[in-house]
Image: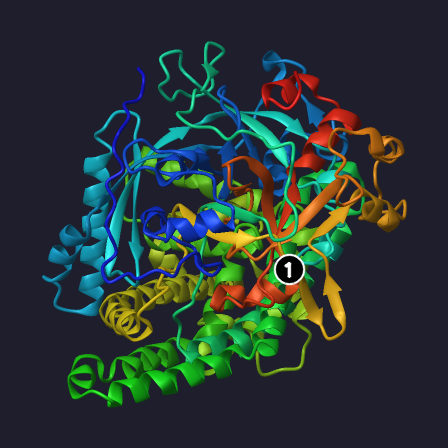
Amino acid sequence: MILPKLPLVLPILASLVLPAAPDEGQWLPQQVLAMDWKELEARGMKLSRDEFWHPERGGVLSAAVQIGGCSASFCSPDGLVVTNHHCGFGAVNALSTPEKNYLRDGFVAGSREEELPAPGMVVYVVRKIENVTDKVHAAQAKAGSALERFQITQQVIQDLIAEGEKEPDTTCSVSPFLEGKEYNLYYRTRLTDVRLVYAPPRAIGEYGGEVDNWEWPRHTGDFTFFRAYAAPDGSPRAYDEGNVPFRPQHHLKVSRDGVQQDDLVVIMGYPGQTERYLTSAAVADREAVYYPLRYDVLTQVIAVLESYASRGDAEQLEYASTIKSLANVQKNASGMVWGLARNAVVERKQREEAQFLAWLGQDAARAEEHGGVLESLKELDLTEQQTTRRDLMLGLALSPRVSPFLRGIADLVGMASQRADSTEELEEQLADRAASDGFLRNFDEIQKPIAAVLLDVIRHLDGRDAIPGTEVLSPTTDEPTAAVLDRLLGETALLTAEGRIALVRDGIAGIRTSTDPLVRLGLGLGIARNDASRRGMEFEGQRLDVGRRWIEAQQEWRGTSFYPDANSTLRVSIASVKGYEPRDGVYYVPHTTVAGLLRKHTGAEPFDAPEALREAAASRGDSRFFDENIGDVPVCFLSDGDTTGGNSGSPVINGKGELVGLNFDRVFENVSGDFGWNADRSRNVSVDIRYVLWVMEQVLPAPHLLTELGVVD
């Protein structure tokens, strides 16, 4: 079945007055159409409004898709999708073995028959967007409490999704905007047959590693190609040998000309989350408590994982994806602490709040309508801050990526405590689940030392931060946490299948009388998890009221340039290729080159450029991708685009709508940009498409793909 061309019916955000062509802002598609197009044309836009995006016919913007939590784009009529190497890292990692190490050596499918099913990779294509604000607000009006408001909102969202998914081959989601002031229902095609086509060697795709992560100058070839497949009639279908390449309605043409300083670029994608409209109190808590603790704990966790991974190729492949993911979060936390302080975000927020209150005081009607909303929001924030440490540590302890062991015992005790009278068949199923020891994998080398790191913080939480059950950790003694944990492990029965099965079969009665220290700890973690969930629902229910009123006041006060926070929905950032000054007396140009890459080469990770690249570099002056203005093959470039997590893999296009790069990072000075854009320091980093093409032509050749991309005959 060929999927129908469904119209995109979008809300027009009320009272929006947009500047001519802003560099700040992660704009919704309809907001871009409302911009001064003549001003965009003066900056270099060659596309008409309709060519860029039309609510019913789509356009260039429609080529932007989601994949694996990242952004991506169709770049050929045969379903070829390009995104970042780090976005495809997990899939390439999963396909690799010590004997066929695609992560280390790279991968090229010589034909479509050689393309490999990519584990976990799913492509989402937006087909229709419907404004459902009235339906959600009508349901919320029936709520009698904050908790009920949250529950009603979730129920109506579930109902809207269920109704929407009655359409064939459709998956739906509902996204709130402006603290619940508006809601959109997204209809998407979900393509699950996604195959790996091309991945550069890790030494290219991750050149510079964590040393260069969030930094400039950058020389990382952060790109990977996949292909989406569907049934012969165009409908989504799981992997099948009879599937054919998916035919998107729109794909991007690849540019061979690239971009120069001050050129217009447009970043299209699915930014994850920004928090631009938080109060000063909320930002202060992030700066002083949340991010420093997150950084400290993850630094210790990563050290444990890296020690194990250094043993050999098999161990490295086992944890490569986990280390990369956690290291990215760790450095982000470091950048947040540094950037929030350097950019004085709290102080700026305080000044803005004072100006807002002064504005309210200038008009009695205004004060009547919006008075007290800032104080109410701050009160919510201060209440939430009373358990910042507890909630952060609970999240880390119960994360299957960070601590399968602690998550495992909490889940085990929870399963046992909820067991009621059951059938013999169900008893056997529960026993089988309890017998599983996957949560103990690499216990002595990884699980136990990571648990010691986490419990060392948890055992000393006090007041409202304290987690029940932690009395077994002897919080009032000076005994090292590692020694405490060793003692508890010697006293527990949960390390054996027999002990876990007995716990589940005894149920809640056995838990209540148990003296097993890990049962008591697991029960406490579970209680804390339930408490955090309840508090979270009540808090969100309150924000649905107070937050919406705050946004309405902000819209009236700010008047212009008002865009919703990022929430993983399709957005557009307008930008220019531009360098910046990271500190006094230093200026960073907006392009890096192969020459700079070679100067970083040390022969050791993370600056070990492959021999094939170094050999190809000797004749790069003759390459069709050599830029005479720059004097080299460009590698990466900077622009002042407004981006955040989720924008990884976002296509970066020029004014003609051609693909010129792939966004993959921000500079360190812009990590805290989630809380506010800064004209002097907000810079995003993209790999130049000419470097991508040069690698595919000269380093790890894929001539058939260059032909498919239309850059060679």
Visible residue check, residue 421:
no
The percent position of residue 711, horizontal first and vertical second, equals 64, 24
Quarter of the image for residue 354 reads: bottom left
At 32% from the left and 37% from the top, the residue drawn is: 54
Viewer-side residue, 578 vs 203: 578
Quarter of the image for residue 86 reads: top right
Q: Dividing the image into 4 quarters, which one contains the C terminus?
A: top right
Q: Amino acid at mark 1?
A: Val
Q: Dividing the image into 4 quarters, which one contains the N terminus?
A: top left
566 horizontally vs 111: left or right: left
At 59% from the left and 42% from the top, the residue drawn is: 662
The percent position of residue 473, horizontal first and vertical second, equals 57, 72
Q: Give the answer, above or below, for where 579 lies relative to 612.
A: below
Q: How is the image coloured?
A: rainbow
Viewer-side residue, 657 vs 467: 657
At 21% from the left and 30% from the top, the residue drawn is: 166
Mark 1 falls on what kind of element? loop
Viewer-side residue, 699 vs 255: 255
Visible residue check, residue 677:
yes
Query: Which residue is the site of mark 1?
Result: 667
Q: Give the answer, above or below, for where 380 lies relative to 58.
A: below
567 horizontally vs 68: left or right: left
At 71% from the left and 37% from the top, the residue drawn is: 691
The percent position of residue 595, horizontal first and vertical second, equals 84, 45
61 horizontally vs 449: left or right: left
Mark 1 crowd level (few <14, some 14–19, many ≥20, 10 Å Cα): many
The percent position of residue 403, horizontal first and vertical second, equals 57, 55
